[in-house]
Image (cartoon, rainbow, N blue to C red):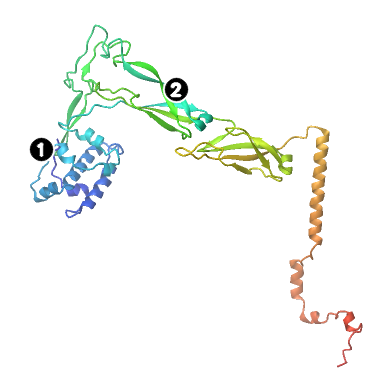
C-alpha cells in the first residue's frame, strides 16, 4: 500500500501542469534511470524512486490524472500496487526484463499470488578439438547439483528431530515492513530475516547436508555438438540446473559453454583458420612447392620466387563450417622466413660469393644509371648561369660551320 504525500506530482517529475504524455514519459524515464536502486547507491535513492514511480503512475493514467487535477484524488490511499502500476508497460521503459521484479521487490503485490522461485542456472565448460568443430559429434559432461538429502529426507533436521515454524513470519517466509519519510508511508514485503525465507527453524541440523535438505549429486549429461559451433556458444539443457529453493518451484537450466582446444597448427578466427608456415630464405628467393596442413589431407602450395615475409595465401573452403550454413571458411597461410646459419665452410663460402655477386650487380647498376643519361646541372651552376651578364652571353664564339654551310665561316661584312 502506498500513501501519497502532499508534494505536487508535476513538481516531482519536473514538468508543467499542461505537459503532454510524451513529456511526462520522458521525464519519468530520465528520473527513473537516475534513481534506479540497482544503479544509484545513495541512501535515499530507493525512496526517491518510489516517489517518482507513484507520480508517473498517476499522471500517465488519463483517468487518475483528471481526478488528480480536479483535486478529487487527494491521496492514493486505498490503491493497491496492482491498481497503480498494473496497467503500465514497464518493458517499454526498462527493456525485456520489464522492471516487474524491481516493482515486486519495492512495492510487493498485495494479495497477488507469488510464483515459486525458479532454481539458478549453472554453466559447465566443455573444450573440444577443431576436428569436432569441423564434423560435429557427441560429448559427455559431468555436473554437480544438489538433490534431496537421503539422510534427513530433505527436511534439513537431524534424524529423530524435527523443524518448527518460524515465529516471526508464521511460516510464510515473508515479513511486512513499514517505512516513512515525511508524510509518505510505504509498506512492503521482504524476506524474513529470521528464517531466510524458508518459513521454518531447524534447531538440530542434519550433519550430512548441514540443514539445507540437499546433498551434492554428480551426474553425466550427453551433449550433441553441431558442426561449426561458434566459439563460446552455450548449449542449453533444460531443467538440469540448480533446484528451486521453493519445493514447488522449477529447477534452473544447465548451459554447456563450448570452446575450441588450442591447436599448434592453426589459429581459429571465427570460421577461418590461420597457419604460419616457415620457409627458408633460399626457397623465398628461388621459389618452391611445399605441403601445408589442413583439417583434412595436406595441400600443396606454390611459393613464388621473391616471396616476401608476411605474404599470405588463401585456400578457399579449407576452414571450419559456418554456423547455420553449408559453407566453410578459408585457410590462410602466412609465410615467415627462416634465416639459417652457415654451418660449414662451404656454405659460408657460397654465401660470401653470393654477397660479392650482389654487390657487383648493385655497383654496375648504379654506374649504368649515372652514365646512361646526361647529368643535370647543380643548383650552384644554375645560379651562376642566371647571374652572368647579358653582354657576356652575347660575346660567345659562334659555332664552327657545319658541312651544310660549305665549310666556310660567313663574312660579317658581306650582305
Residue 216 vs residue 92: left or right? right
Residue 113 vs residue 240: left or right? left
What residue is drawn where x is 56% and y is 35%?
A: 267
Q: Nearer the viewer, residue 215 or 195?
A: 215
Tell me the number on the disc at residue 383: none
| Mark 2, secondary structure of its residue | strand
Q: Nearer the viewer, residue 93 or 263?
A: 263
Is residue 400 placed above or below 174 in the rendered structure?
A: below
Tell me the number on the disc at residue 78: 1
- Residue 200 lies, in percent from the top left, at 21, 17
The residue singled out by tag 2 in the image is 140
Q: Earlier in the sequence, mark 2 or mark 1?
A: 1
Is residue 342 placed above or below 403 in the rendered structure?
A: above
Is residue 1 placed above or below 67 in the rendered structure?
A: above
Residue at the far right: name it: 407
Q: Nearer the viewer, residue 184 or 224?
A: 224
The image quarter in which residue 179 lies: top left
Residue at the far bottom: name it: 415
Specify the quadrant that holds the N terminus. top left
Amino acid at each position: 500500500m502506498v500513501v501519497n504525500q502532499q508534494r505536487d506530482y508535476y513538481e516531482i517529475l519536473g514538468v508543467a501542469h499542461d505537459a503532454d504524455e510524451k513529456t511526462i514519459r520522458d521525464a519519468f524515464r530520465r528520473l527513473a534511470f537516475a534513481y534506479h536502486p540497482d544503479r544509484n547507491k545513495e541512501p535515499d535513492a530507493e525512496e526517491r524512486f518510489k516517489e517518482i514511480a507513484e507520480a508517473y503512475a498517476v499522471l500517465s493514467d488519463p483517468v487518475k490524472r483528471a481526478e488528480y487535477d480536479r483535486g478529487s484524488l487527494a491521496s492514493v490511499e486505498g490503491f493497491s500496487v496492482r491498481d497503480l502500476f498494473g496497467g503500465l508497460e514497464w518493458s517499454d521503459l526498462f527493456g525485456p526484463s520489464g522492471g516487474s521484479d524491481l516493482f515486486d521487490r519495492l512495492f510487493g503485490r498485495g494479495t497477488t499470488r507469488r510464483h515459486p522461485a525458479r532454481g539458478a542456472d549453472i554453466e559447465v565448460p566443455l573444450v573440444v578439438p577443431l576436428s569436432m568443430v569441423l564434423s560435429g559429434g557427441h560429448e559427455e559432461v559431468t555436473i554437480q547439483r544438489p538433490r534431496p538429502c537421503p539422510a534427513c529426507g530433505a527436511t534439513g533436521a537431524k534424524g529423530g528431530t524435527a523443524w518448527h515454524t518460524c515465529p516471526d513470519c508464521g511460516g510464510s517466509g515473508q515479513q511486512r515492513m513499514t517505512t516513512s519519510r515525511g508524510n509518505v508511508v510505504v509498506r512492503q514485503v521482504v524476506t524474513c530475516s529470521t528464517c531466510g525465507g524458508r518459513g521454518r527453524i531447524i534447531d538440530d541440523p542434519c550433519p550430512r547436508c548441514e540443514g539445507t535438505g540437499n546433498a551434492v549429486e554428480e551426474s553425466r549429461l550427453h551433449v550433441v555438438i553441431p558442426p561449426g559451433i561458434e566459439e563460446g556458444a552455450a548449449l542449453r539443457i533444460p531443467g538440469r540446473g540448480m533446484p528451486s529453493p521453493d519445493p514447488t518451484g522449477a529447477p534452473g537450466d544447465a548451459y554447456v559453454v563450448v570452446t575450441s582446444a588450442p591447436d599448434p597448427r592453426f589459429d581459429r578466427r571465427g570460421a577461418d583458420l590461420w597457419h604460419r608456415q616457415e620457409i627458408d630464405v633460399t626457397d623465398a628467393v628461388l621459389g618452391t612447392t611445399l605441403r601445408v596442413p589442413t583439417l583434412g589431407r595436406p595441400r600443396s602450395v606454390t611459393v613464388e620466387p621473391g616471396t616476401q615475409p608476411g605474404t599470405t595465401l588463401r585456400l578457399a573452403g579449407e576452414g571450419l563450417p559456418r554456423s547455420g550454413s553449408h559453407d566453410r571458411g578459408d585457410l590462410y597461410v602466412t609465410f615467415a622466413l627462416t634465416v639459417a646459419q652457415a654451418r660449414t665452410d662451404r656454405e659460408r663460402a657460397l654465401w660470401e660469393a653470393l654477397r660479392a655477386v650482389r654487390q657487383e650487380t648493385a655497383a654496375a647498376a648504379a654506374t649504368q644509371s649515372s652514365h646512361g643519361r646526361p647529368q643535370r646541372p647543380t643548383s650552384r651552376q644554375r645560379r651562376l648561369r642566371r647571374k652572368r651578364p647579358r653582354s657576356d652571353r652575347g660575346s660567345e664564339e659562334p659555332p664552327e660551320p657545319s658541312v651544310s654551310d660549305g665549310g666556310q665561316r660567313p663574312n660579317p661584312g658581306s650582305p
